[in-house]
Image (tube, rainbow, N blue to C red):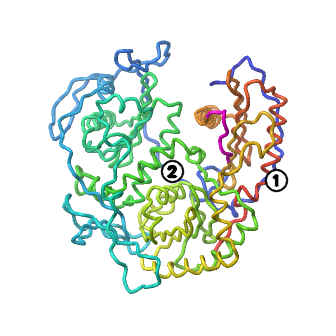
Amino acid sequence: MFSSPKSPALSPMSPIMEDLLSDSNSILTSDESLSPTLQPRKYKAKPTTQLSLEVSSTACSSSSADSSVKSFNAISSKIEDNINGETRSKEGSVDDLLIGLMNRSNSVTSNDKYLSAFRSSKGFINSQKRTIYSEPENIGSECEVAGSVDSDSSIEWIGSHTMSNDHSNVPVISVDEEYSGYRRKYGHEDPQSVNWCRHRKHFFILSSAGKPIYTRYGDESRISGYTGVIQAIVSFFVDAEDSIRCINAGNHKFVFLLKGPLYLVAVSRTNESETQLRDQLNYLYNQILSVLTSTQLTRIFEQRINYDLRLLLGGTEPFLDNLATSMSDEPGFMLGSIQCVRMNKELRDKIGSILQIVKSKDLLYAMLIANNKLITLLRPKRHSLHSADLHLIFNMVNGSSTFRSAESWTPICLPKFNNKGFLHAYVCYITGNVCLLLISPDKDKFFELSDAKSIIVEELTSCNALQAIEEVSQSEGYSIADVGAAGLRHFIYKSRKHVQYTSPTFMAPYNDPHEKQKYTHDRMHSRIRPLKVHYYVSPTETILGWITSTFELYAAFGPLISKSALTNSSHTLLKWIKKEEENLFILNSQVF
């Protein structure tokens, strides 16, 4: 999908959109230079290695015959391979290890039962109420491991109560069958089965000791052979004072992310680039931090390097699975931005003014969410919310149907805000699709926020705003026909200053163009040669990528559209977005 060198350059297009509001009015921040708040920490660069391996067709059926990748053969060395407690010396190259990673048969392991706990305001607990870890008293405090549990213990969840004003106590509600016995969609697949190998993208998380923590497909207890090989490959480069980043083997791409005691690996044969896959691994890592915090994670492995982290992450598989699926389907992860519900500006402002009722020094954020889209958000004057943290919040709310059944009070760590301590989230669905989220640093504010929720619902109902919100949340959004741009099939538009994007629903007969838009995004944001305009024509469609100081546009047109018609349609699209921007985006940030 590279641009053809023979094709004439696209006619220059003058941006017709004026600069949007300054960053001081933005509700969100990103890692882009346009939004300097909460920039990621700078670390000293380490030497890295990227491998490109030629794999024969017998070793990897997806290898391309005309592949032009260079081959790098590692010097044979003795590598200590620790699998299932057996340490043995092995002669082999990185090529052998790679092929072993793809084709290695599993060692005989038992299907160990491990803890299936859910998070609550009191930590992970079993039926005897023994705390596994205690939560911090404030945002910056540290978490400590306070004990252990029996893997066969039944688990209960504290943090929900019925919709009443009786604050005498919070009854303990047993986790229902859906979560005490969560059945993963692909959990039954065996790594040796054909179906397991057919998946286009795998995620693996393991400890630095090689213990499996999470796999997107299959059962973690059956992939110890694979995680042992991954650990050996990483250790090979660590011993050489190097850090492996990526291995290219035919159509497969192995991307590594090393985060202290955790190793995260993506094995993909999609069109996603190394950078995009590494960003997805970072989201998975942040999901783990949202449960444990970086301080507790580091302390656990300092005390016991071969600790089985599944004991603390048990019950969070729905969130990891939901995140792994969402990252492939939703462009917001690729764009580093979020999508807002399209609604009338007056209605959104009215909702924001009603949320001001909960104004308190102990409240950081208040927001309404519907179907992974933001309705409105209130924040402190000096604190915006990073889009990566908001994605974790969306994933938490949508990853579990338990939140729909009762008011919930749950700890959550927002890594971009502070990765060393917990905040506490009050979660309640006020209608079938609309969720109210109130985030506080004080773990004892549940009942105060529950009372505030009742007042908010009453005010929204009295002015008919609650019914209007529910109607908007049930709609499927807008269609490409609403734009009125000739030849336009689909588009994704990102407001760079407000870190928000908008996109219409897909309309038949056009197929999902996400793969090509992902490629266009990666090509335009290339570190070697970034582009301002990318134009590509194929037998089935025409793809346009366009970046200015205020927006990013990725649009798909028909294959026969001329350049002049494409230019006119793009201007028509931008005029429509300019006209509808107050309904599509949250431009004026409301603060406490």
What residue is drawn where x is 78% and y is 27%?
561
- The spot of residue 404 in percent (x, y) is 47, 65
Residue at horizontal 39%, vertical 39%?
Answer: 265
> What residue is pinned by disc 1?
579
| Above or below 405: residue 459 | below
Please name the amino acid that badge 1 sits on. Answer: Lys
Assign a secondary structure to mark 2. Answer: loop
Q: Which quadrant: the N terminus?
A: top right
Image quadrant assignment for residue 219: top left
**Mark 1 falls on what kind of element?**
helix
x%, y% of residue 76? 27, 22
The tag on residue 42 is: 2
Residue drawn at (32%, 59%), measured in percent from left and top?
A: 177
Does residue 545 sit above or below 282 in this rendering? above
In the drawing, does residue 157 fall left or right of residue 412?
Answer: left
Question: Which label sits on residue 48?
Answer: none
Query: Left of 477 or right of it: where is 133?
Result: left
Image: magenta residue range: 503-511
